[in-house]
Amino acid sequence: MFLFSGRGYWQELIESIVWAHNKLKVAPATQPRALSIVQGRAVGVTHYLLGGIATTWAFFLARIISVG
C-alpha cells in the first residue's frame, strides 16, 4: 500500500491511479508529470484559499440556519 516503499504518499497515489487507468484502458496515454516549484505553490495557495472560503461559507450558512 502507500508509504511502504519510502516514496511520497502523493506519488504512490498518482502512480496507482495511472496504473488503474492503464489497466482498464480508460486513458492509456495519461502519464503523471511533475509540477515546478512555482506550480506546486500555486496549487497549494489555491487549495488554501478555496478551503478557507468554503469553510467560512459553511460556518455562516450553519449559523444562519441555526439562528434564523
Image (spheres, rainbow, N blue to C red):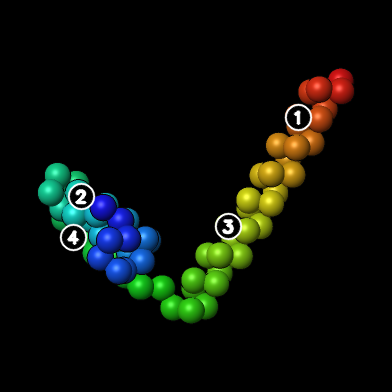
Q: Contact (CB < 8 A) between labels 3 and 2?
A: no
Amino acid under label 2?
A: His
Whichever of callouts 3 and 2 sits on the residue coming sooner in the sequence is: 2
Calculate the distance from the C-alpha at mark 4 to the C-alpha at mark 3: 27 Å
Position of residue 64 in the picture relative to residue 43 (left or right): right
Q: Locate the C terminus and report the quarter of the image it occupies.
A: top right
Mark 2 element type:
helix
Amino acid under label 1?
A: Ala
Calculate the distance from the C-alpha at mark 2 to the C-alpha at mark 4: 9 Å
Calculate the distance from the C-alpha at mark 3 to the C-alpha at mark 1: 22 Å
Whichever of callouts 2 and 1 sits on the residue coming sooner in the sequence is: 2
**Residue 12 at x, y percent in the picture:** 29, 60
Q: Which mark is residue 62?
A: 1
Front label number (2 vs 1):
1
In this view, the residue in front, 4 or 12, is 4
Amino acid under label 3?
A: His
Calculate the distance from the C-alpha at mark 3 to the C-alpha at mark 2: 25 Å
Q: Residue at x 59, y 61 (%)?
A: 46
Q: Residues within 10 Å of mark 4 (few under 14, many from 20)?
A: few
**Residue 40 at x, y percent in the picture:** 49, 71
Whichever of callouts 4 and 3 sits on the residue coming sooner in the sequence is: 4
Q: Which residue is mark 3?
A: 47
Calculate the distance from the C-alpha at mark 2 to the C-alpha at mark 1: 39 Å
Mark 1 element type:
helix
Whichever of callouts 1 and 4 sits on the residue coming sooner in the sequence is: 4
Q: Residues within 10 Å of mark 1 (few under 14, many from 20)?
A: few
In this view, the residue in front, 11 or 57, is 11
Mark 4 element type:
loop
Q: Residue at x 69, y 44 (%)?
A: 55
**Residue 6 at x, y percent in the picture:** 30, 69
Q: Which mark is residue 10?
A: none
User: From the viewer's perspective, is residue 38 above or below residue 56?
Assistant: below
